[in-house]
Image (cartoon, rainbow, N blue to C red):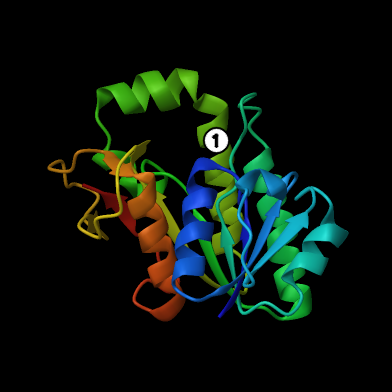
């Protein structure tokens, strides 16, 4: 499958690129400086671009079978990169006719807010990451209102660790037995699994250990 990954050099993006290549996908890694991946493979195309540039986004999406969006906010935590970048991705996909979008959001968005504990609700998302969280909410609204075949994945807090394939997903919003954490490798594992299943088509599965 031909897949373009937006945010390819981020901590999740790197995992998605590596695992997608291992699975035999033809990968286009979109980032401002994709050479930072330091990966050279026949099935990998490095695409240097800015997700805020709609023409660049269109060029990267043309000819693809699916899009994986794992955009980050960067160190500035400015609160608009995800939503504005995702808007450009959606518009390009609808214009070109590429339909499958897998978008990484965060646990706590939408009805998954009930899964969070006090710390995540009122310290992290209520104060420290307030703008980032708001950006996620706008991003999700844009995806849900699109005409695409979308899946929004809501992972818990990222931790280091190997890909295990053993994690919980699609659990209820009132589930408080989860750890609220998951390894970046397992996030990538779940994102890529959505390429070959329609289980969560048009849905917002949460993800955690």
* Image coords of residue 49 (percent x, y): 80, 51
- Picture quarter containing residue 145? bottom right
Res. 2 visible in picture: yes
Q: What residue appears at the point 46 percent right and 18 percent down from the top-left corner?
A: 127
Q: Quadrant of the N terminus?
A: bottom right
**Percent coordinates x, y for residue 78 in the rendering:** 66, 28
Q: In this view, does 56 lie to the left or right of 156?
A: right
The residue nearer to you, when weighing 8 against 121, is 8
Q: Residue shown at 75%/45% (left/top)?
A: 32
Establish if 164 lies above or below 114.
below
- Residue pointed to by mark 1: 134
Q: Is residue 169 left or right of residue 194?
A: left
The location of residue 42, given as percent across then percent down, is 64, 72
Q: Where is residue 54 in the image (x, y as percent from the top left)?
A: 83, 57
Which residue is pictured at 34% across the width and 59% down the height? 205
Q: Residue at x 32, y 46 (%)?
A: 112
Note whether 126 is above or below 156 in the view shown. Answer: above
- In terms of secondary structure, where does tag 1 sit? helix
Image quarter for residue 192?
A: bottom left
Q: Is residue 204 visible?
A: no
Q: Residue pushed farthest right?
A: 55
Q: Left of 43 or right of it: where is 121?
A: left
> In which quarter of the view is residue 193 placed?
bottom left
> Mark 1 packing: few (<14 Cα in 10 Å), some, or many (20+)?
some
């Amino acid at each position: 499958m031909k897949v373009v990954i937006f945010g390819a050099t981020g901590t999740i993006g790197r995992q998605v690129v590596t695992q997608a290549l291992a699975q035999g996908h033809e990968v286009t890694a979109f980032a401002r400086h994709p050479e930072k991946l330091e990966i050279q493979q026949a099935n990998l195309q490095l695409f240097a671009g800015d997700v805020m540039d709609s023409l660049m986004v269109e060029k990267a999406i043309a000819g693809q079978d699916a899009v994986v969006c794992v955009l980050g906010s960067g160190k500035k935590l400015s609160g608009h990169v995800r939503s504005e970048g995702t808007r450009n991705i959606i518009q390009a996909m609808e214009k070109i006719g590429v339909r499958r979008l897998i978008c990484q959001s965060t646990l706590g968005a939408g009805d998954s807010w009930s899964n969070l504990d006090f710390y995540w609700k009122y310290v992290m998302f209520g104060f420290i990451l307030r703008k980032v969280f708001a950006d996620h909410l706008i991003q999700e609204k844009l995806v849900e209102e699109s005409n695409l075949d979308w899946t929004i994945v809501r992972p818990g807090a990222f931790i280091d660790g190997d890909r295990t394939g053993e994690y919980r997903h699609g659990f209820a919003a009132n589930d408080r037995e989860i750890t609220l954490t998951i390894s970046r490798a397992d996030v990538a594992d779940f994102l890529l699994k959505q390429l070959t299943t329609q289980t969560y088509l048009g849905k917002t599965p949460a993800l955690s250990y």
